[in-house]
Image (cartoon, helix red, strand yellow):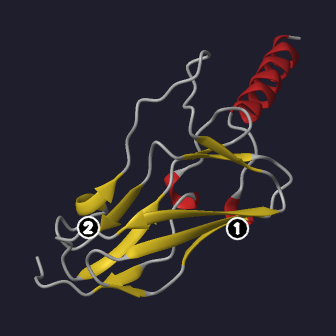
Amino acid sequence: MRSGVACMIIAAGALACGDAAGPEFGQEITIQTNSSDYEPGQLIIVTTTNRSDHVVYDDHCGGEVQGFEFLGRWNASYGAMRACYLFDRAGAHALEVPIPGGSTHADTFHVNGQAYSGTWRVRLYLRGENGVSIPESQAVSNTFRVGGTWSP
């Protein structure tokens, strides 16, 4: 009898935990830059394609152009970060853009004028319909090269 109750509790817990994270997006979201090579100061056009059946929200108050070589890990040093403090009455960012399932959204970033030559990417701050952030591994663009005037 005790093992049956324990199994029911474990099963109920597993179902409850599985629901909290929301849908897994994986390959259903792609983030692509308009070029594979940039120079410092250039504009980057980033296209997010949502092939899922769920709305994804792109937080235009966040997002970064991140390089790798300077610290040996992805970071925005000599890159570009967005930040703003616009909130609606409910406390959500006023610049959250919904990307419905089956649609695309274009956004722009800049390569920092002081960017070093190396490998870069764009990191977006995306969340699902339930408000849960989409993991970083699913919210980054393809990598691209920046031809700067210096290397780390």
122 and 91: which is toward the camera = 91
Is 129 positioned to the left or the right of 62 in the image?
Answer: right
Give the mark nearer the N terminus: 2 vs 1. Answer: 1
Q: Quadrant of residue 29?
A: bottom right
Could you tell me how many numbered marks the image carries?
A: 2
Q: Is residue 54 left or right of residue 152?
A: right
Q: Which residue is mark 2?
A: 112
Distance between mark 2 and mark 1 Cα atoms: 29 Å
Q: Amino acid at mark 1?
A: Gln
Residue that numbered label 1 is attached to? 27
Q: For the point 17% across and 69% down, which residue is it?
A: 70
Q: Is residue 97 above or below residue 80?
A: above
Circle 2/circle 1 CB separation < 8 Å: no
Q: Position of residue 116 (x, y in %)?
A: 18, 77
Q: Secondary structure at mark 2?
A: loop
Q: Quadrant of the N terminus?
A: top right
Q: Position of residue 2 (x, y in %)?
A: 82, 11
Nearer the observer: mark 2 or 1; the answer is 2
Residue beneath the point at 81% across and 48% down: 54
- Tag 2: residue type? Asn
- The reply, left or right, for residue 50 in relation to residue 102 is left
Q: Is residue 79 above or below residue 93?
A: below
Check the picture and name the quadrant holding the C terminus: bottom left
